[in-house]
Image (cartoon, rainbow, N blue to C red):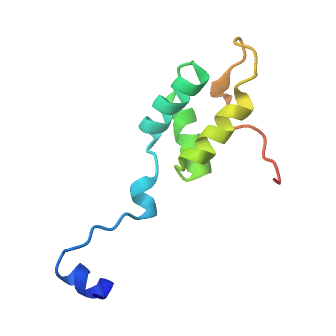
Amino acid sequence: MPIASLRAHRQVTEIRARDLRFTPQEAAALLGKVLRRDIDSATATEWTERTEGWVTGLLLMALSLRHRRETDDVNIGVPERSPY
């Protein structure tokens, strides 16, 4: 059965990229757990925009900061850009 027919009869559920993206609130919760620090809403919003809400991007950015000393401020923005 073609997908168009399934859509017309509402017999298919589609998951799109926008459905998988993290919101800034979800990103703050995830980053807070990974980094074991509170993440302010401005930082969560910036990180979410930079990664387009993709969890892998958020995790990679968090891992790049994970080895900073506890006294370092994670809320200063995103890590430096890398061409890789």
Q: Is residue 67 visible?
A: yes
Placement of 65 over or under 11, stated as above or below: above
Left or right of 48 in this view: 8: left
| Residue 7 image position (x, y, % from top left) | 25, 79
Q: Residue furthest left?
A: 9
Q: How many marks?
A: 0
Left or right of 51 in this view: 65: right
Q: Residue furthest top?
A: 71
The residue located at (57%, 34%) in the rendering is 43
| Residue 55 image position (x, y, % from top left) | 54, 45
Most foreground residue, 41 or 35: 35
Placement of 42 over or under 11, stated as above or below: above
Q: Residue furthest front?
A: 1
In the rendered view of the protein, which quadrant contains the N terminus?
bottom left
The residue located at (42%, 36%) in the rendering is 25
Left or right of 66 in this view: 27: left
| Residue 62 image position (x, y, % from top left) | 65, 33
| Residue 75 image position (x, y, % from top left) | 63, 26
The residue located at (66%, 25%) in the rendering is 74
The residue located at (70%, 25%) in the rendering is 66
Placement of 66 over or under 79, stated as above or below: above
Q: Is residue 77 visible?
A: no
Placement of 41 over or under 13, stated as above or below: above
Quarter of the image for residue 12 reads: bottom left
